[in-house]
Amino acid sequence: MLTPEQIREGTFLLFDKPKFWTSFDVVAKVRRVLMEYCNEKKLKVGHAGTLDPLATGLLILATGKFTKRIDEIQATDKTYAGTFYLGATTPSYDGETKTEEHTSTEDITDEKIIAVAKKFTGEIMQVPPVHSAIKQDGKSVYLKARAGKEVILEARKISIHRFEITKINLPEVEFLVECSKGTYIRSLANDLGKELGCGAYLFALSRTKIGAYDLKNALDVHEFLHTYKIKEEKKN
């Protein structure tokens, strides 16, 4: 276990974010337990790179002086593994909203999927999902989208270093992506579906790497909270 001094001074904590938790949920719960453990009324805790609630995988938290290095971590490349669902779309580009525009995938071959995926490798322009936390007029655009208001976002330049189709069992397609900061895998799913002509949305996603940091070295959030909470109770 880390000492209170180490936590106050600053450290990185690697977690495997649970599905349905927001990144802020992890920060809030970890901060609360660490504040009790360190006997502090205030403690700097932040995260490097937000994950959507339905996504799992590597989430890096920083404490103390290490919060100053968050921008440095966020600027690094990311690696994701997951599953696309072909033959339908959703407004959010993932499973958070209801499916629509159902289309047959009978004419979609493995060869076509692999060929189309290659078109999205390299430096490309990508439009973020309207159901995202991007700010417009000081508010997250997903609030407008959920209210049925029109949201227009400009395309951004991103880099996809590797886009590998690892398994095809239609309507599900498993993949691995290595990409730059600012890449939305949900948008990649939607764009792939458009190019294939059948529609697609992100069915499952896990972030496996952030720069040199790997998911295999991540902590289980529940175990971490339990361990430090038990330690605090023993102190009392």
Image: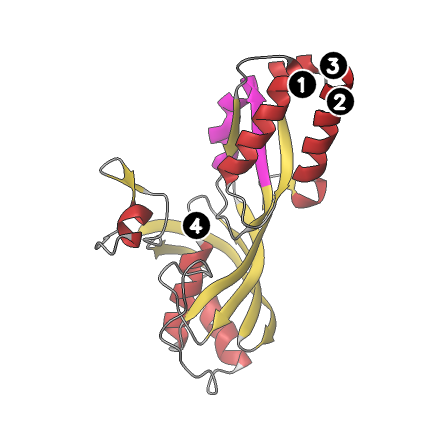
Comes first in the chain, label 2 or label 3: 2
Comes first in the chain, label 4 or label 2: 4
Q: Which color scheme is applied?
A: secondary structure
- Cβ atoms at labels 1 and 3 below 8 Å apart: no
Identify residue for label 1.
37
Residue type of the residue flagged with mark 1: Tyr
Residue 210, image x and y in percent? 57, 41
- Cβ atoms at labels 2 and 1 below 8 Å apart: yes
In whole angstroms, how far apart are the C-alphas of marks 2 and 3? 9 Å
Are there few (<14), some (14-19), or many (20+) residues within 10 Å of tag 3?
Answer: few
Identify residue for label 4.
183
In whole angstroms, how far apart are the C-alphas of marks 4 and 2? 39 Å
Q: Which residues are magenta?
A: 59-75
Q: Specify the quadrant that holds the C terminus.
A: top right
| Residue positioned 50% across, 29% down in the render | 70
Residue 80 higher or lower than 230, as above or below: below
